[in-house]
Structures are given as structure tokens and as C-alpha cells.
Amino acid sequence: MIDPQQRNLETADKEQQNQRENDVQLRWQEVIDKGGEGAPEWMKEAAARRKAAQEKESTLAPWIKELKLKNKDLARKAGHL
């Protein structure tokens, strides 16, 4: 059986990881919205690719977007096993 203290530590680690992922996504979105202005060249190129991918996904049906999100979450959970 898992010790409650260890469970709390694991939960805190997961929350920190989620927060880091959210922060990274927000930073990328800022770079994308600014068109790469003030960013290094490699980041501008990556932002352009991400923007193209976002535009491509905006034409997808809502159920396909939901399916992709579920698959992404399942892959993330499988990675922790």
C-alpha cells in the first residue's frame, strides 16, 4: 500500500509537471501571436510550424479534436507507467 505522504509527493510532482507544460504552451502561444517578433530564429521557425498546425486543426471536426486530445492524454498516462 502506498504511504499517504508518498502519494502527496507524487500528486505535487504531477501538478508541477502540468504547470510547467501549461507555462510552455502559454509562452509558445505568445510567440505565435507576435509572429516570432523578438524571438531567436529557430523559435520563429518553430512558431511558424506550430501556427500552421493550429490553422490545420481549426478546420477539423470537433469530434476529431476531442479524439486527438483523448489519445494525447492516454499516451501521457502510458508514459508514466
Image (tube, grey):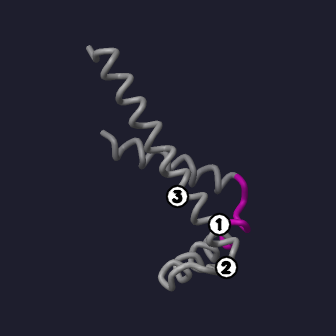
Quadrant in which residue 2 is drawn: top left
Q: Residues within 10 Å of mark 2 (few under 14, many from 20)?
A: some
Residue 10 in percent (x, y) is at 36, 30
Vertical arrangement, residue 34 with respect to residue 24, above or below: below
- In the rendered structure, the answer to whether residue 65 lies left or right of residue 12 reads right
Distance, label 1 to label 2, CA atoms, is: 9 Å
Q: What's drawn in magenta, residue-wise?
A: 55-62
Residue 57 in percent (x, y) is at 66, 66
- In the rendered structure, the answer to whether residue 63 lies left or right of residue 18 reads right
Secondary structure type for disc 1: helix
Distance, label 1 to label 3, CA atoms, is: 10 Å
Question: Which comes sooner in the sequence, label 1 or label 3?
Answer: 3
Q: Amino acid at mark 2?
A: Gly
**Residue beneath label 3, please?**
24
**Residue beneath label 1, please?**
30
**Residue beneath label 2, please?**
35
Q: Amino acid at mark 1?
A: Glu
Q: Residue at x 72, y 59 (%)?
A: 61
Distance, label 3 to label 2, CA atoms, is: 17 Å
- In the rendered structure, the answer to whether residue 35 lies left or right of residue 19 reads right
Vertical arrangement, residue 41 with respect to residue 61, above or below: below
Secondary structure type for disc 2: loop
Vertical arrangement, residue 22 with respect to residue 7, above or below: below
Q: Residue at x 47, y 37 (%)?
A: 15
